[in-house]
Amino acid sequence: MYGGGNTFEAMKATALVDEDPIKLAEFEARIERGEKIEPSDWMPQLYRKQLIRMIEQHAHSEIIGALPEGTWITRAPGFKRKLALMAKVQDEVGHAQLLYGAAETLGKSREDMIQDLINGKSKYSNIFNYPAFTWADSCFISWLVDAGAIVNQVANSKGSYGPYCRALERICAEESFHLKYGHHCVIHLATGTKKQREMMQAAVNRWWAPMMHFFGPSDKISVHSEILMKWKVKMASNDECRQQFLDMYVPKIWELGLTIPDDKLMKNEATGQWEYTEPDWDEFKRVINGDGPCNKERLAVRRKAEERGRWVREALLAPKAKYVTPLA
Ligand code: FAQ
C-alpha cells in the first residue's frame, strides 16, 4: 500500500521459495528459541532485506530527527537548556552512527544508505517533516517523541538480530535521559505563565496527529508487520506500541492541565484499550512519500552536509602522505 510495485505477500512468496527449506526451518527454530542471529549466521534474504530497510530508516530518522530540535539550540531559554539540548541532539546523531553500523553488518554500505536518503529513495520517520515553530514544539519532541521512540525501541531491543538489539539497548539508555529532560521542559511551560501554557497547548495541538502516525499504519493495513513479528524483528505491532504510548502518556499530559485534540480519545475500561479518532492515513502516506511540510527542507540540509563534508571523508580515506607533512 505504501511502497510501489509488488504486494508484500507476492514478494514474500517469491523470496522464500528460493531458500533452502532445511536452513530456513533451522533459522526459524533458533528464533523461536529466542537465540540471537549474528551477521555471520545464515539468514534468509528476506530477513536481511527487511532488517536493512528498517534499521536504515531508523538511522535516517535519527539524523533527520536532530534537525527540528537542532535549530533550537541557539534559542533555547538559558544556558542549562542550551547545554542539555546540545547534548541531546549530539546523542541523536550518535544513535544514527550506531544504527548505520548495525545496518552495515548486513551488507549495505553507509555511503549507499546516505545516497538513498538524500535521493529520496529511503524513508525516515514522518514526524520530523513538521516544523518546530516554537520552543514548546522542541519540548514536545524531547518528551513525547522520545517517549514514543522508547516504547518501540525497548520492545525491539529484545528482538532477534544481535547487532540491532545491542544498538537499541544503548540508544534506550540515552533516550531515557532525553525523556526526563523533555518532561521537565514541558512541566515548566505547562505550569508557567498564561503565555507559556498557551504555547505548550498549541504545540500539543500541532503535534498530536503526527504523533499518532509515528507508530506506523494500523495493524489492519501495515505491510511488513506480519513477517517482522514472525521473525522477531518487531516485538510489538504498530497498534500495540500506539496503545502502550497512550496508556503511559495520556494521563501524564492530562495531569499537566493540557488537553489532547481528539474528542474521541478515551480509555475503554471494559477492553483496556484506548479509543481514538482514526488517524488520517492519507496525510501519513503523503508525508512519508515526500510531500510533508518540511521534507524538501530536511533533505536539502542533509544534501548540503554531505557535500560540505566530502573533503573530510576523502582526506580520511586518502593515503596519509598526501595530507600529512612528516615531522623532520
Ligand atoms: N514514518 O508495514 P509498516 C526517533 C512506512 S526514532 C515513516 O507498518 P514497518 C528518535 C514503512 O517504512 C523514530 N514511514 O512498516 C528521535 C513502510 O514503508 P516501505 C524512528 C513509516 O516497518 C526522537 C510503510 O510505511 N523509529 O524518533 C512510518 O513494519 C527525537 C508501511 O508500514 C524507528 O524507525 C513512520 N512513522 O513498521 C530522534 C524504529 N511508519 O519501507 C530525534 C524502528 C511506517 O514499505 C528526536 N522501526 N512507515 O516503503 C520500526 O519499528 C518500524 O519500521 C515502524 C514501521 C514501526 C516505524
Image (cartoon, helix red, strand yellow):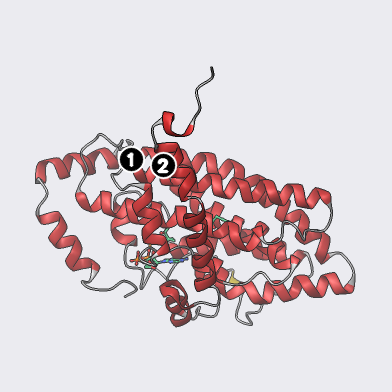
Q: Quadrant of ligand 1?
A: bottom left
- Can you give x and y, in whole percent of width and height, for residue 66 in the image? 59, 56
Query: What residue sits 20% from the left and 71% below the top?
Result: 6
For label 1, the residue is: 105
**Residue receiving disc 2:** 101
* Rendering quarter of residue 14: bottom left
- Amino acid type, mark 2: Gly
Is the distance from the Cβ of mark 1 to the nearest ligand 1 atom less than 8 Å?
Answer: no
Q: Dots 1 and 2: beta carbons under 8 Å?
A: yes
Q: Quadrant of residue 73?
A: bottom right
Residue 231, percent from left and from top: 29, 49
* Depicted 173 relative to depicted 258: above or below: above
Query: In the image, is 44 to the left or to the right of 102?
Result: left
Q: Which of the image's four quarters has the N terminus?
A: bottom left
Q: CA distance from mark 1 to mark 2?
A: 7 Å
Q: Residue furthest top?
A: 328
